[in-house]
Amino acid sequence: MTQRVAVVTGASSGIGAAAARALAADGWHVVVGARRLDRLETLAAEIGGTALALDVTDDASVDAFAAAVERCDLLVNNAGGAVGTTPLAEADLDEWRWMYDVNVLGTVRVTKALLPKLVASGDGLVVTIGSIAAREPYKGGAGYNAAKHAEAALTRVLRLELLEQPLRVCEIDPGMVETEFSLVRFAGDAERAAKVYEGITPLSAEDVAEAIRWVASLPAHVNIDTMMIMPRSQAGASVVHREP
């Protein structure tokens, strides 16, 4: 295969699916990975890509996924998420373990597995989708804040460790994006999830996907180390202007 290959995790919905569409439109062959294979197959058929089942919290799943990817020029580490809003004093350690496993260890597993192919491409790129929570903690986000800070740290360490290799590393930290994120966080409570975005125009998945596409389109000597994207009405993790 001579066409450049992009791998997108967590691609069954939201930012991952939007990124797959944007990259495919820009000429990439996109391999999409997630647990919901039915959604992936529909997406892959739409964009002319490849759908592979992937659970980033499972070592065997990641190994099988990486073995099925013959070439990798771009890895978009998008799989992640948050559950719950309990304060530290009432921390549910099972929620914390899940968030650490999917956001941090999941990113490590997939990156480690595909790193040899990324380097072998001669111009590899790793884009990790973080969060404003990686830069600024906020109430109600203790476990997610901790996980995203850890994901940011490992992304920056990767940049340092592979400085002599033909590999670029980028971290994109979005603010408020209206996807299934809040619905998952609130255990399917659609009314509560909708209130998160009341009175503002949040980012869309396509907004973040365009940033991913742009970073991936730059020449090999240009590395966008970090990027933070917020809606106009948001100026910080907890600083939001809402219209009445």
Image (cartoon, helix red, strand yellow):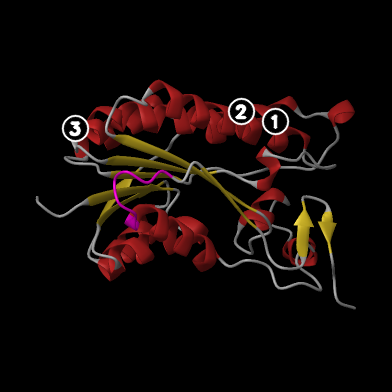
Counting other residues with Cα less than 10 Å from the Cα at mark 1, is it few (<14), some (14-19), or many (20 or more)? some
Q: Is residue 57 visible?
A: no
Depth order, front residue of 151/90: 151
At 34% from the left and 64% from the top, the residue drawn is 43
Percent position of residue 136, x then y: 75, 40
Q: Earlier in the sequence, mark 1 or mark 3?
A: 3
Q: Label 3, secondary structure: give it.
A: helix
Picture quadrant of residue 58: top left
User: Magenta part mainly helix, strand or loop?
Assistant: loop
The three-letter code of the residue at mark 2 reads: Ala
Question: Which residue in the structure is indicated by mark 1?
Answer: 146
Percent position of residue 227, x then y: 56, 49
Question: Which one is closest to the eye, mark 2 or mark 3?
Answer: 3
Task: Determine whether label 1 and label 2 are within 8 Å by CB.
Answer: yes
Q: Label 1, secondary structure: give it.
A: helix
Picture quadrant of residue 39: bottom left
Picture quadrant of residue 221: top left
Depth order, front residue of 237/192: 237
Q: Is residue 41 visible?
A: yes
87 vs 212: above or below: above
Q: Which mark is residue 150?
A: 2
Task: Determine whether label 1 and label 3 are within 8 Å by CB.
Answer: no
Q: Is residue 127 a member of the stretch shown in magenta?
A: no
Question: Which residue in the structure is indicated by mark 3?
Answer: 120
Looking at the image, residue 121 sits to the left or right of residue 15; the answer is: left
At 62% from the left and 66% from the top, the residue drawn is 203
